[in-house]
Image: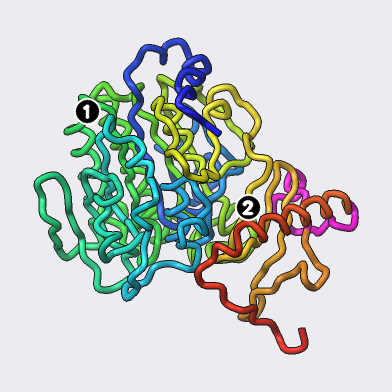
Amino acid sequence: MLRAGAGALLGAALPAAARGRRAPSFIVVLADDLGWGDVGSNGATMIATPALDRMAREGVRMTDFYASANVCTPSRAGLLTGRYPIRTGLAHEVIQAKDTNGLPPSEVTIAEALKPRYATALIGKWHLGHVEPFWPPTVQGFDLFHGLPYSHDMRDLGLYTAGPGVELTREDPDLQTLTERFFDRALAFVEAERARPFFLMLALTAPHLPLRPGAAHAGHSQAGPYGDVVEEVDAGVGRLLDRLKALGLDRDTVVIVTSDNGPWFDGSAGPHRDAKGGSGWDGGYRVPFIVRAPGYLPAGRVSDAIAMNTDLLPTLLAMAGQPLPPNVAIDGKDLTRVWTAGAASPHDALLLFNNERVAGIRTQRWKLVVRSYYRGYELPLDRFGLPLLFDIARDPGERYNVAQRHPDVAKDLLARLAAARATFEPMGVRRAPERLPAGL
């Protein structure tokens, strides 16, 4: 387990120019439902993403990066806590407007772990509880919150602000200007806190439905309104990078762009199978991931090391020279050597959950899928003697089951699956019975 000395180890791995600098600042731009294949550096041809492509040229792009869930709420819980969402009680579906659950106050977020050395802000979408004691996000370590309680297709929707000396205030949001406003508020936070390290979570609502591109971007993309919205996000990232440069913060700031899950009804998962909400398939979990930090990371590195958004907490804490939260089971791993030295993944395997059940296991080469949806049913494939084994190195689209060709691999992953089920599934809080077709 990573300890306080990780910062010293990181210093040895960083470029010499990075040593002796102040602690890095962090900006995590979390898109909502952005597909793996919607970014130019991942092969997009109908959507222009010059700022994200520039980040990839000047930083590190991870090709095999996973969200910790295939839908919104659990994925965000996993990212902020470094823990599989089932540990937090939020693995089942997403929080709805009438729900009263949320991220337990006992959970330690990245923001809480970085305080008091860091100024912290969450700008954008929260979706981790909108009633006390889970609300507003300032209860989870954020000095400033400016954003929405949940997705912008839900009602009753308000744009809220809370922070130092500011009571929680509400206004009606204009969906067409929301992305621009979020970037504007993010830039203002960066400028206000430029004298000390900061952590900014910029959790956009785009490109989640409904699609409301700003006037400057509407009608510009070959990919329709979805493409317009993605291009607006890209333009905002470009503005952010330019402002960091103008403020002299460019080399000291780690900028990450990723997504909370795969694409929904619009968007591309690239070569990967299925989409947001699909059970064990990569299209719902595998997301774009680019990290840029000129003072700390090399340019132009592409890594196929398997990783997950739960890795952000231990990685950012390592870069900040901060210890992990004590007495907490952290599932994420430190990625600093992957980024700085091209090291192999620190993970032996990643677990993919569909709600509160283990739906798949990914190792560096192999992927085992044991749950899939069919005509309203979620089928436990392994129960029917049909676990699906894929050689991801040769078949990233998960098209051809090779379990019979590689029985030892299948046996090993099924044993890991059984162990993971025994460890995690009893933690579920919404353990619904299986719903199977008649006769099965």
**In this figure, which residue is indicated by the disc labeled 1?**
194
* Residue 21 horizontal side relative to residue 147, left or right: right
In the rendered image, which quarter contains the N terminus? top right
Depth check: give the residue in front, 95 or 4.
Answer: 4
Dot 2 crowding, Cα within 10 Å, few <14, some 14–19, many 20+: many
Boundaries of the magenta span: 389-405
Residue 54 visible in this rendered orientation of the protein: no
- Amino acid identity at mark 2: Leu
Going 28% across and 47% down the picture, which residue do you hit?
Answer: 122
- Amino acid identity at mark 1: Arg
Give the structural element (helix, strand or loop) at label 2: strand
Q: Residue 41 at what x, y percent from top left?
A: 53, 39
In the rendered image, which quarter contains the C terminus? bottom right
**In this figure, which residue is indicated by the disc labeled 2?**
351
Q: Residue 186 at what x, y percent from top left?
A: 24, 42
Dot 1 crowding, Cα within 10 Å, few <14, some 14–19, many 20+: some
Going 35% across and 25% down the picture, which residue do you hit?
Answer: 24
Depth check: give the residue in front, 18 or 188.
Answer: 18
**Alpha carbon of mark 2 to alpha carbon of mark 1: how far?**
38 Å
Give the structural element (helix, strand or loop) at label 1: loop
